[in-house]
Image: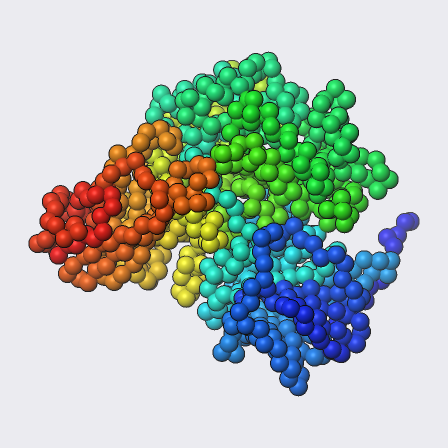
Amino acid sequence: MNQEPVVHTRELFPGQLLSYTKQDHVITFRCDNGLLLNVYVLTDEIFRFRFAPEGYFLQDFSYAIAPDFSPAVSKLQIVERKNYVSIKTAAVECRMTKNGLHTTMLDLKGKVILQDDKGFHWEDYEHGGAIVMMSKVAQEEEHYFGLGDKSCHLNLRGMRLQNWNTDCFGYGPDTDPLYRSIPFYYGLHHGQAYGLFFDNPNRTLFDFAREREDATSFWAHHGEMNYYYIHGPQLMSVAERYAQLTGRPELPPLWTLGFHQCKWSYFPESVVKDIAANFRERNIPCDAIYLDIDYMDGYRCFTWNKEYFPDPARMIRELNEDGFKTIVMIDPGIKVDLEYDVFKEGLEKDAYLKNPDGTYAKGNVWPGPCVFPDYTKPDVREWWGTLYKDLIRKMGVHAFWNDMNEPAVFEVESKTLPEDVRFDYEGIGASHAQGHNIYGMQMSRASFDGIKEYLYPNRPFLITRASYAGGQRYASVWTGDNVASWEHLLLASTQCQRLSVSGFSFCGSDVGGFNDQPDGELFVRWMQLAIFHPLYRVHSIGYNDTGDSAIDEEAVARNMETFNRDQEPWSFGEPYTSMSRKAIELRYRLLPVLYTAFWQNVTKGTPVLRPMSFMYQEDAETLHRMEEFMVGDNLVAVPVSEQGATSRGLYLPQGHWYDFRDEKEYQGGKEFYIAAPLESVPIFVKGGAVIPLAPVMQYVGEKKIQQHEVHAYYTEGTLESVWYQDEGDGYEYEGDCYRLTTFTLKGDGRNLELTQQHEGHFIPTYETYKIVLHGIHKRVSRCLVDGKPVSYYRRGTILEIKVPRDFGELQLG
């Protein structure tokens, strides 16, 4: 009988501190057992800890850290005490014990934020390799959030999770791992928040007080113990500082926030044109139509099936004339075929991943045997980017979708390439064990750079399935191959919230579910939820139950009900078509809110979607809420995820709130029960907020706005709201061609004052606002705009006033 070889390990710890030295912002600690620790003080709030157990560091390199990130510390003080060394900035203190280098992070009042349990330890294998581990104290009542795309409760306490990008068709609740690796989490206890980013691209694991209730730990079987501490004390501040560290995306073109329609697959051309015609004939807004893998010639990327699409440039041009952008799929697997130009070019450039013996690594994907570009090689990224030129310049394709880039491989248990496949890794060299989790990110990078070059002066748009921390710089994401179920409707909500606070604000799900078929009720509820998700895209498996794109026409004819896999907004008949249209129209009304939230994300790193706990962390009730979430600064979305529900409970934090639907007012700090019939989309607005609403259009830019609606919700006190505008595409906004409006609404119980200030030189098309004031219960004796009386129209507690676009002050009393 064959027996598994015994692998002996030993657990090791840092020894006694011998010395420490400082050079610029880096403090190096040396122990008596040879271990080195570098502590990098990057900002007043961000510390990096990098361990070298054997006394030397390998080349310092990370794909995650933003290329433009640079250290900036206002104060750095190092003091040696009897038992520890103190490193203090203007925001936080780090204490390092002399015995074992145990770390404690404190605020400047001496309150412990994060401290080591066992701290750093590692296990050496007898025949090489090591596990690097870190354990921290799990504080009493500590809550954990983040870690990217996980199909579990928003609060991670009590869970063990791992990061290894995996093709997870039809995943379910608590399936782990999924498509992306974002080894970054938040901790919150006693009103203080922090972030911890474990920048190790290998398979990483996290235990949030599951094995031991008083300890949280993270580890990897390869690579360094290299992590960042990010100080709060607010969760939102941590989110913004993490984005500063790992990078923020470019501002997306406005049309990408419209509605998108996708299916595996729309072909031939007549089907695509019919889908487009149905949207316009039914007056259902839509900005983009997608082509999945069947548009290609035998699944060969960067080619066209000439039988299905004899003249793609003409088709794309005609779709564009009708207001539709065309988005196409590109996978990383390149078919092994000497008649295929892309494959041959890659051979000439030695572009593909290799086995240890120097042969090209191969795996079966859609075209059959494929090779895979090594996107960690700069010249390969440059070559890959050039492949988009003809699709953009000759065909007119507007945007792209990178799929299967974990990389996914069929017919093998691991679902991917062997771990010993070799990567260039910027000349450093690495195995697939280290390169796997960054593969999709680097494909995104290569694609993004090429698309940006050939689309200029327009802005690029790219979607990716797989990615790593920092990948938000290049692409948006969706939650992968989900299922048409009520369970997955709730998952879509929590996954997108988690992605947003993990750096990937431009996220969404396959609306209605990719696998299986929703009924009309489920589809409508999903359409309503996705109003608030940045990527608003319906996508479904169509007839491809087994991955075979061939359609059994006779079976379809025999039983249309069973084989009806259409998932367009009209596919379920009335009343669901009208309800879907209403949801999409509301999305287009809310575009100014979403675009402003993206401006905040791009400039400050503020997440677009915000769990209630991130906005109201001092309210203990919000720490366990999953379904309600905020979009931007002032809107609370309240999706309905229970079959047959016509009402639901919700919690509103302290403050004054308005039901967007019917003007009802609520004082928060408790749970409410509201009506939520199927045709209804519950939204709540913070009292004091000013919300711009756009007119409904069939696609972004269909017509010029003649007058813009601005809704102001009265409350006692003062609140500022911002509204960002620009051309919606192009890069002139990077100069001063934008318009940032700051509204200030003041109420004192008797009077209302609304003022606005502008920044930037963008000039909108409209000349006037229709100001809609909500919550005006008292009789109005005067209404002044810039000191002059104006007329108004009153409906109950609502007042409507027409004012010049550049008014300075509106007074009501």
The extreme left residue here reads 781
Residue, x 39% and y 24% (percent of image)? 279
Residue, x 59% and y 76% (percent of image)? 77
Q: Work out whether residue 437 can be spotted.
A: yes
Count the marks: how many?
0
Residue, x 15% and y 61% (percent of image)? 750
What percent of the width, then of the height, locates residue 406? 66, 41
What percent of the width, then of the height, locates residue 411? 73, 34
State left or right for residue 515 relative to residue 223: left
Colouring scheme, one of rainbow, by chain, secondary structure, one colour:
rainbow
User: For residue 482, what is the image quadrant?
Assistant: top right
State left or right for residue 747 relative to residue 612: left
Is 763 drawn above or below residue 309 in the view shown? below
Query: Along the line of sight, which residue is nearer the eye, 583 or 772?
Result: 772
Q: Quadrant of the C terminus?
A: bottom left
State left or right for residue 710 relative to residue 240: left
Is 761 drawn above or below residue 538 in the view shown? below
Q: Work out whether residue 122 can be spotted.
A: no
Residue, x 52% and y 46% (percent of image)? 249
What percent of the width, then of the height, locates residue 180? 61, 46
The extreme right residue here reads 1
State left or right for residue 323 relative to residue 505: left
Query: Along the line of sight, which residue is nearer the eye, 302 or 620?
Result: 302
User: For residue 805, what is the image quadrant?
Assistant: top left
What percent of the width, then of the height, locates residue 444? 61, 40
The extreme bottom residue here reads 82
